Image: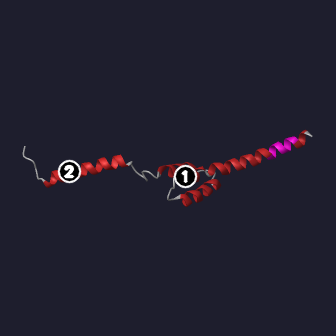
Amino acid sequence: MLDYVALALLFFLAVTLVYGIIAIHDVPYKIAKARDHPHQDAIEAAGWVSLFTLHAIWPFLWIWAMMYRPDRGWGMGSSGSRALEDRIAALERRQATGPSAK
């Protein structure tokens, strides 16, 4: 009887391990889908490739999925770009007035 219990336990652990590995490889795709990432399909395909390469590229997929955010896209937030635009406008005004006398 204990042989069958041990066999069932081994079978259960093997199935759980395989399912867990497959579920973990899909995390970057779920992040990308939640963030409405423009490269969702590529991240999903790369996740399957990562599964067959023993998750060698999985950390890069995680970074790729986390880089994009719907509110700011790929770069800085709007406050950072607005400050940069203000500085450029100030420099253009200063250049248009000509060199100032000291």
- Helix, strand or loop at disc 1? helix
Q: Residues within 10 Å of mark 2 (few under 14, many from 20)?
A: few
Residue 37, given in percent of the width and then of the height, sits at 50, 56
Looking at this view, name the residue that lies furthest to the left.
Answer: 101
Q: Judge whether residue 57 can be spotted in this image.
A: no
Count of marks overlaid on the render: 2
Query: Is 15 positioned to the left or the right of 40 in the image?
Result: right
- Helix, strand or loop at disc 2? helix
- The stretch of residues the image draws in magenta is 5-11
Residue 63, given in percent of the width and then of the height, sits at 51, 49
Residue receiving disc 1: 34
Task: Residue 89: give its label.
Answer: none
At 28% from the left edge and 51% from the top edge, which residue is drawn? 85
Mark whose residue sits in front, 1 or 2 = 1
Q: Amino acid at mark 2?
A: Leu
| Magenta-colored stretch includes residue 91 | no
User: Looking at the rendering, in which quadrant would you find the C terminus?
Assistant: top left
CB of mark 1 within 8 Å of CB of mark 2? no
